[in-house]
Image (cartoon, rainbow, N blue to C red):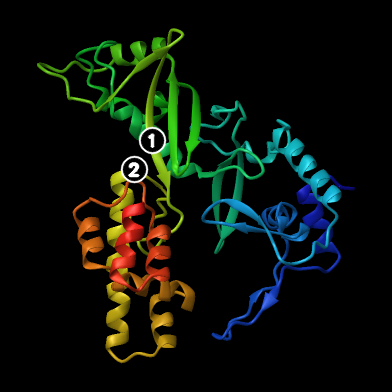
Amino acid sequence: MELENMLAVAEWLNQNGYHTKKWVPKSGEIRGGKAFQKSSIQRILTNPVYIGKITHQSQNKVYAGRHKPIVPKSVWEAVQDTVRRRITNPYAFSHYQTHKTILSGKLYDDQGQIFRLTSSKKKGKKFLYYYNGVGGHYLPVEQLDSFVLKTLKMTDFYDLEPLADRNSLTDIQMQQWIEKVICQSVDKTHYLSIFLNEKQIRTDSGACPRISGQAEERILHTEKLDGTLYVRNTFIVDNVSSLKLQNGTARNILTVRQLNESLVRGLSRGWQLKRLLEKGKTMRECEGASGMNKRTFTRYLNLCYLSPNLVADILEYRSPRNLTLRELMNLAEGNVDFKEQEKEWNKL
């Protein structure tokens, strides 16, 4: 409350000899004990556990805890007001604006709140996110920018320039078409409305090489709102789709089909881990070979004991719409009886 700046708090802590929590797991490798970052300060300041509450991450809900608060609620709420004020301040994230992104300054939620740029580091690599405030969404910049450009490439602009070969256009040209993007979130689905500069599209398309005959069919179609051209698309964020499952590439933003494919990869990963155990390896050896901790290893292993009917539905793309890998793991972890699993499945 005195400094009113999370980065300044992190610097003060580091200068005074404080560090993040340090512990030694069973593997013997020392974890934590590092300098504070702005992101770690933000997680602490916005965590309601200090006022006697518990956050259910997968449900994104807050419940009353059984423990006593150690921070007065009035102080905690005052801090949240300060954090929100900093986030809505256009200069608060100015040191991130040097990054060149497709949607910087153009991405809003359905309440008119602009998404700012923030970042985190993991194993020395920096990850950028679009962020719309306390309790809001973190959307990975690289994946969302790529998704928006892919959406434009899938969009039918036949009425504007019927015979333009738009495959010759660069990403930089298509970026100039975007005036504003609104992201509306309902449950797990994010609805993206991309508002476009119709004049720029006509100009660029008019300069494209001509194609003979029928133009390539595009699966998305444009609409107009108050005379402004826009196109809509949807995506899901699945934070359990790990780097290993994605062959070393982080792809958290998925379409419905890609989300189902992540379930198939999850099943495959579970059976790979089961074979490690069947070869006579100990749990510790399996954890080391897979690069997973015991908790994650067990959750994947549970997928091997799903009802055959559920597995068949997943492989044949009949799974409940927008079912995430995390939810599938929760179902497998909570039920061992096939009939109970199928009953929960039908509820989804």
Q: Is residue 246 visible?
A: no
The residue type indicated by label 1 comes to: Thr
Tell me the residue at 56%/43% (across/down): 137
**x and y, in percent, of residue 6 in the image:** 77, 49
Q: Residue furthest top?
A: 227
Disc 2 + disc 1, Cβ < 8 Å: yes
Q: In the visual, does 344 lie left or right of 76?
A: left
Name the residue that disc number 1 marks.
234
Q: In the visual, does 159 lie left or right of 55?
A: left
Tell me the residue at 41%/44% (across/down): 236
Q: In the visual, does 165 lie left or right of 258?
A: left
Image-quadrant location for residue 118: top right
Which of the pair 113/299 is nearer the observer?
A: 299
Q: Residue 255 shows which numbered tag?
A: 2
The residue type indicated by label 2 comes to: Thr
Q: CA distance from mark 2 to mark 1?
A: 7 Å
**x and y, in percent, of residue 85 in the image:** 76, 36
Tell me the residue at 47%/42% (across/down): 187
Which secondary structure lies at badge 2? loop
**x and y, in percent, of residue 341 in the image:** 33, 65
Which of the pair 100/45 is nearer the observer?
A: 45
Image-quadrant location for residue 131: top right
Mark 2, residues whose alpha carbon is within 10 Å: few (<14), some, or many (≥20)? Answer: some
Tell me the residue at 63%/82% (across/down): 24
Image-quadrant location for residue 337: bottom left
Q: In the visual, does 289 lie left or right of 214?
A: right
Above-or-below relation of 319 to 146: below
